[in-house]
């Protein structure tokens, strides 16, 4: 594998919307970051008893919520926006 291909992978960004539910809360997440980091994040949610499914931008934008939108930035996952019901 060439160095250029490796660098392209390191800088890759994936974006997705997720609906996450557990016995106490339901939220919609708008996440973006490196694909490996996003997979790790989803795996951690499932391991902690959450049900996770892919969603859409439309569902995220019209999702009814009673708390403020939470926004998290870190160096591995570019952004996570969550709306809680």
Image (cartoon, rainbow, N blue to C red):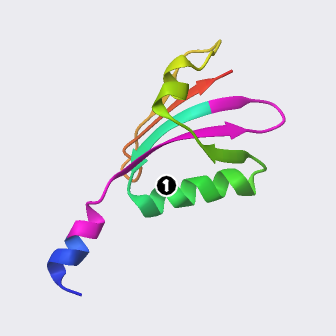
The one nearer the camera, 20 or 41, is 20
Which quarter of the image is occupied by the C terminus?
top right
Res 78 → quadrant: top left
Say whether residue 10 is magenta: yes
Q: Which residues are magenta?
A: 8-27
Q: Relative to residue 82, is residue 21 drawn left or right?
A: right
Give percent across and percent down for residue 84: 64, 24
Q: Relative to residue 15, is residue 48 drawn left or right?
A: right
Say whether residue 26 is magenta: yes
Q: Relative to residue 21, is residue 5 drawn left or right?
A: left
Is 18 placed above or below 26 here? below
For label 1, the crowd category at 10 Å Cα-Cα, with few meaning under 14, some 14 to 19 and many 20 or more, is many
Res 73 → quadrant: top left
Q: Residue furthest top?
A: 66
Residue appearing at x 38%, y 57% in the figure? 34
Is 51 placed above or below 19 here? below
The one nearer the camera, 2 or 54, is 54
Residue at mark 1: 38
Give percent across and percent down for residue 33: 38, 50
Give percent across and percent down for residue 48: 75, 51
């Amino acid at each position: 594998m060439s160095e250029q291909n490796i660098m392209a992978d390191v800088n890759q960004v994936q974006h997705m919307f997720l609906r996450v539910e557990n016995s106490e809360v339901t939220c919609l997440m708008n996440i973006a970051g490196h694909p490996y980091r996003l997979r790790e994040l989803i795996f951690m949610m499932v391991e902690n008893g959450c049900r996770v499914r892919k969603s859409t931008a439309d569902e995220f934008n019209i999702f009814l919520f009673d708390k403020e939108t939470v926004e998290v930035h870190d160096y591995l996952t570019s952004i996570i926006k969550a709306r809680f019901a």
